[in-house]
Amino acid sequence: MVTARSLLNFPRRSALLLACALACGACPAAAAEEPQTLRFADFFAQPIGPRGPQPSVVLLAAHNQRVRLTGYMVTQERPRPGRFFLVPRPLIMSEHADGEADDLPPATVLVFMPPAERDLVLPPSRGLLQLTGLLQVGRQEHDDGRVSWVRLLLEPRAGSTDADTTRSTPTLAATP
């Protein structure tokens, strides 16, 4: 039965439902506008148990979602074109000296540049980087034999095309 009291509560209920839908990503337009902020601290379930680090519910839920992640680019002796590692703390890899025994932390993200910038070898960046792209979670072996568990596919910059490969600056936003 519809009463005057229930009609007065309708706008409040509608606003609450709309807010819940937007927060949960049920509205595709709102979800496309603002990426989910993901932190390295969200990667693993806590506390770490006898089976070692296990992916958290937050990380698994972010699979194939648009996310924003802030971290440090790993400085490498031999960087590969179109990709780099993002980690929670500054790190320098000595591939020549260490070989496959690198010091990458468990919470490492392999970042891939947009298709138009996959041939770029990026210069090292020492500050924090805030990156936005599509997150992929799961084991994947790459052409160099390295296995990654978390990957971020960076979004192309506004106005760029796949044919635009002459750009010399990467799609990165440094944070203060």
Image (tube, grey):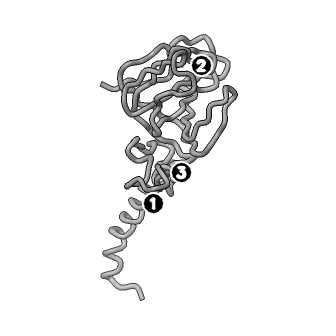
Q: Are marks 3 and 2 in contact (CB under 8 Å)?
A: no
**Helix, strand or loop status at disc 3:** helix
- N-term-proximal mark, 1 vs 2: 1
Q: Which residue is mark 2?
A: 80
Name the residue type under label 3: Pro
Q: Residues within 10 Å of mark 2 (few under 14, many from 20)?
A: some
User: In terms of depth relative to the viewer, which is nearer, 95 or 130?
Assistant: 95
Q: Residue at x 63, y 15 (%)?
A: 165
| Image quadrant occupied by the C terminus | top left
Q: Establish if 64 lies above or below 12.
A: above
Name the amino acid, label 1.
Answer: Ala
Numbered badge on residue 28: 3
Instruction: From this view, report whether residue 166 is shown above or below residue 27.
Output: above
Query: Residue 137 is drawn in which quadrant?
Result: top right
Which of disc 3 and disc 1 is earlier in sequence?
1
| Residue annotated with mark 1 | 21
Of the two numbered discs 3 and 2 in the rendering, the one whose residue sits closer to the viewer: 2
* Residue at 67%, 26% in the rendered image: 144
Give the mark nearest the N terminus, 3 or 2: 3
